[in-house]
């Protein structure tokens, strides 16, 4: 009786949902999985760090979108405005820029850990595939985001980077045109990259992240070496 | 109510807090609070409307040259981030706030009728800013206008 009265608000909220959706047991099985002893090592944190950096990218990216203007006339101006006029704008943009590089580095480090510990082997092949997709999406984020400041480095970096598509036999020019929105890098490329960076890639990465996380919980972390 | 006079359901508050437990709560609580403040302060400051680039508040602003505004013409300019309508009238240049006193639409100069008109609710003002017809409750406030050489300057307005 006393114990029942002492049931705190969290239990009561949980009861409310459990009564309606019957979720307590499946959720607890999913969320309360103990981490095996051999996995309590710093190099088992690399994937989590990558995800933390992704969360930082999401938050700082949303903040940057409030002041950034994706037109050839105003893009660079708006970057200067963020850096010089917006309070802590320099901080938010610098965090976004540095976390972008770090996210790729940690993504690759995580991949190496999975490779060296053999965690990609049966039955985890599909999660390796999802992980490779996540790496490619991260690289695509980096590539499209690189153009957005619209300075000389961005323009020539994207020129050289997208030129690679042009050497594909037969359809190279068509692919290049599709990526750039024309034969050259123009305002059309800028809005194209902006749309991909802000809408297409986030939707895709959430899809693969969800898959990656559900599968790792379902299968558990791979055994010790 | 239970024996100790407290209402039931208070959970941990009913149990005495040990010295170690108190220190733990204090250190963790302070660390959490410091982190939250450290993260939220820049974000809130970032969201706060930044100062626009441009001239200092209330300064004198060069809006146009006299060649841009022949007699009987009027034009809306941005003066310290406020819209100001400048008109070349027979009595000289006039500068008035271009924000309609009714609901804040931006007025324009109707060259044919030689009046200031508001596009939203068909209000008309004369070149002194007085209401000729329509719903505005008060005249358009005026700005000081100066001509130096062939350049027109408008003074006032907030940044």
Image (tube, rainbow, N blue to C red):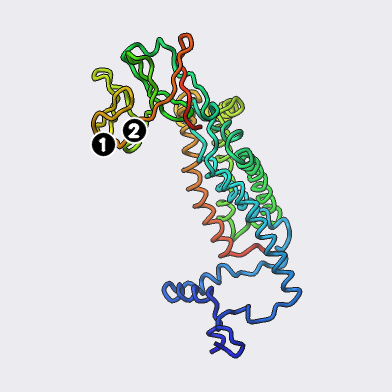
Element class at badge 1: loop
- Front position in the image: B109 or B16: B109
- Front position in the image: B144 or A153: B144
- Disc 2 crowd, CA 10 A, few/some/many (<14, 14-19, 20+): many
In the visual, does B72 lie left or right of A153? left
Q: Position of residue B88 (x, y in %)?
A: 35, 15
Report the disc number at residue B135. 1
- Front position in the image: A185 or B133: B133
Q: Residue at x 73, y 60 (%)?
A: A41
Q: CA distance from mark 1 to mark 2?
A: 10 Å
Report the disc number at residue A128. none
Q: Quadrant of residue B77?
A: top left
Q: Position of residue A14 (x, y in %)?
A: 50, 73
In the visual, does B59 lie left or right of B64? right
In the visual, does B135 lie left or right of A88? left
**Numbered disc 2: what chain?**
B
Q: Position of residue B43 (x, y in %)?
A: 58, 47
Which residue carries the number 2 mark? Answer: B100
């Amino acid at each position: 009786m006393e114990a029942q009265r002492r049931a705190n608000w969290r239990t009561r909220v949980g009861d409310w949902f459990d009564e309606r959706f019957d979720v307590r047991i499946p959720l607890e099985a999913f969320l309360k999985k103990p981490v095996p002893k051999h996995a309590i090592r710093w190099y088992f944190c690399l994937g989590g760090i990558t995800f933390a950096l992704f969360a930082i990218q999401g938050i700082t990216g949303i903040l940057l979108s409030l002041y950034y203007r994706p037109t050839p006339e105003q893009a660079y101006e708006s970057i200067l405005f963020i850096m010089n006029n917006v309070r802590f704008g320099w901080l938010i943009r610098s965090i976004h820029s540095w976390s972008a590089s770090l996210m790729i580095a940690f993504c690759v480090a995580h991949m190496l850990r999975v490779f060296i510990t053999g965690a990609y082997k049966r039955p985890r092949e599909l999660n390796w595939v999802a992980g490779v997709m996540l790496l490619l999406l991260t690289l695509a984020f980096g590539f499209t985001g690189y153009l957005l400041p619209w300075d000389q480095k961005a323009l020539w970096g994207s020129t050289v980077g997208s030129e690679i598509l042009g050497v594909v036999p037969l359809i190279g020019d068509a692919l290049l045109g599709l990526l750039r929105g024309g034969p050259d890098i123009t305002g059309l490329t800028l809005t194209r990259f902006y749309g991909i960076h802000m809408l297409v890639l986030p939707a895709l990465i959430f899809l693969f992240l969800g898959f990656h996380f559900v599968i790792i919980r379902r299968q558990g972390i791979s055994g010790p070496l | 109510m239970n024996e100790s006079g407290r209402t039931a359901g208070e959970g941990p508050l009913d149990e005495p807090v040990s010295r170690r437990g108190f220190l733990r709560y204090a250190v963790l609580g302070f660390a959490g609070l410091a982190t939250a403040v450290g993260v939220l302060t820049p974000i809130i400051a970032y969201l706060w409307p930044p100062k626009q680039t441009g001239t200092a508040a209330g300064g004198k602003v060069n809006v146009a040259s006299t060649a841009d505004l022949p007699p009987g013409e009027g034009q809306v300019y941005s003066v310290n981030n406020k819209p100001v309508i400048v008109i070349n009238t027979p009595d000289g240049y006039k500068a008035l706030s271009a924000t309609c006193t009714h609901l804040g639409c931006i007025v324009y100069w109707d060259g044919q009728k030689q009046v200031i008109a508001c596009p939203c609710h068909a209000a008309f003002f004369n070149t002194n800013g007085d209401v000729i017809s329509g719903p505005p409750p008060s005249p358009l406030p005026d700005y000081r206008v100066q001509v130096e050489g062939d350049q027109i300057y408008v003074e006032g307005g907030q940044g």
